[in-house]
Amino acid sequence: MPRALITGITGQDGLYLAELLLDKGYDVFGLIRGQNNPKAELVARTVPDVRVLAGDLTDLSSLLRALNTSQPDEVYNLGAISFVAYSWEQASLTTDVTAKGVLNILEAIRLYAGSDLSGVRFYQASSSEMFGKVQHVPQSESTLLWPRSPYGVAKTFGHYMTINYRESYGMHASSGILFNHESPRRGPEFVTRKVSLGVAAIKLGLQEKLVMGNLEARRDWGFAGDYVDAMWRMLQQPEGGDYVVATGVTHSIRDLLAAAFSAVDIPEWEKYVEHDDRFLRPAEVDMLIGDATKAKSTLDWAPTVTFGELVQMMVESDLAALTASL
Ligand code: NDP
Ligand code: GDR
């Protein structure tokens, strides 16, 4: 039975990836931080077969302990401070976790594996946010990185450190440059979930307005369930590598609002949306659209959920949950 260790098990992707690996017959371990993490219960309920280990990406010895206990064939580093807007508020902490945390886990694997580094395959959760002020359209593995947020800079460090461990030590280390991916499990601070929750609440008469930031930004949005499958496929390749994972279709926040309101039969969405500068960022990533040709040809990977289906899925899920709670 193959064994996997996932950091970020309490997050959106951690839960989907754990489900996928359990289905494939893996023994799955998840790293969880804090002495009384409020999301531990969610993990126990959603993926009860995952064995939870205490640890933090900023604490190297806790990572070594987790590796010694789990003895993994594959390590998926999904843990991060992942909210871009928040990364300006706590840039130093974001750097400690999202950047230096990658070095910590790579180094912990090197110390743990000793001379047999080939026995542990590593996945790093890199991000389209690294493209920032985009230098080419669409963005591929060879597009110059130009990060525009402390989060983007931190992810860029982790991306190059992963490549560096591959090149320096021959580690089977892969960097998945994933574009935005969403689901009913998405945190409510991110724009898709904020909109799906808000639209469901407006439809039920529980909320009057949605207060938003920049409606012109464009993102390449896919479904998280599809994207964790790409992570797994990367670690099944004979060599580590870098892969863009994206749908190749871009939409604005305006399109997102129109689709979400139309999913509950409210065509005139502008009436319900207000602007607040508080949701603007010091520097914006205006437009992302990915070229996943390499993932398609090498990993035989393709997205299965369209933007319209994704928005519908999220709005319906929030509508059902809110209705049940009334
Ligand atoms: P989430 O924000 O949902 O999850 C982040 C996870 O990181 C949580 O489990 C969180 O734990 C954990 N974490 C935070 N701080 C630490 C720490 N100090 N030590 C260990 N773990 C920590 O993110 P997603 O699931 O959406 O994303 C997974 C990864 O993929 C992240 O690295 C993200 O940056 C990256 N990514 C995501 C994309 C997306 O569109 N979703 C696109 C590209 C990259 P806790 O619950 O305790 O806070
Ligand atoms: P992003 O996702 O920054 O792309 O990072 P987010 O959903 O937060 O923002 C997307 C775009 O929407 C605009 N926006 C708003 N965003 C939020 N959160 N709230 C608002 O009210 C709002 N109004 C407009 C933003 O300005 C932005 O342009 C996500 C995270 O999952 C990262 O961890 C990941 O690496 C990248 O996707 C790829």
Image (cartoon, rainbow, N blue to C red):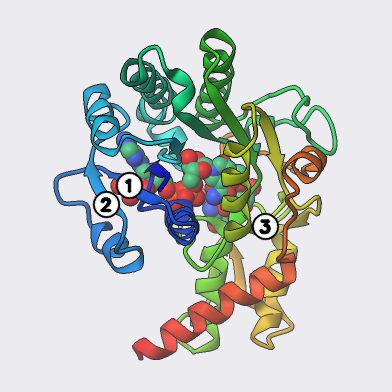
Asked if the residue at label 1 sits under 8 Å from ligand 1, the reply is no
User: Which residue is label 2 attached to?
Assistant: 51
* Residue for point 69% across, 59% down: 253
Decide if residue 208 is in sight here: no
Indicate the amino acid at tag 1.
Answer: Gly
Q: Quadrant of residue 172?
A: top right
Indicate the amino acid at tag 2.
Answer: Arg
Name the foreground residue: 212 vs 227: 227
Q: Quadrant of residue 111?
A: top left
Quadrant placement of the C terminus? bottom left
- At label 1, counting other C-alpha atoms closer than 10 Å, the crowd grade (few under 14, some 14-19, many 20 or more) is many
Q: Is residue 137 above or below residue 108?
A: below
State how far apart marks 3 and 2 are (Cα): 29 Å
- At label 2, counting other C-alpha atoms closer than 10 Å, the crowd grade (few under 14, some 14-19, many 20 or more) is some
Q: Earlier in the sequence, mark 2 or mark 1?
A: 1
Q: Earlier in the sequence, mark 1 or mark 3?
A: 1
Where is residue 224 shown, x and y percent of the image? 58, 57
- Labels 2 & 1 near each other (Cβ < 8 A): yes
User: Which residue is label 1 attached to?
Assistant: 30
Indicate the amino acid at tag 3.
Answer: Gly
* Residue for point 57% across, 81% down: 316
User: Which residue is label 3 attached to?
Assistant: 222
Name the foreground residue: 116 vs 241: 116
Q: How many marks?
A: 3
Where is residue 36 shown, x and y percent of the image? 15, 51
Q: Is residue 199 above or below residue 33?
A: below
State how far apart marks 2 and 1 are (Cα): 6 Å
Q: Nearer the viewer, mark 1 or mark 3?
A: 1
**Disc 3 element:** strand
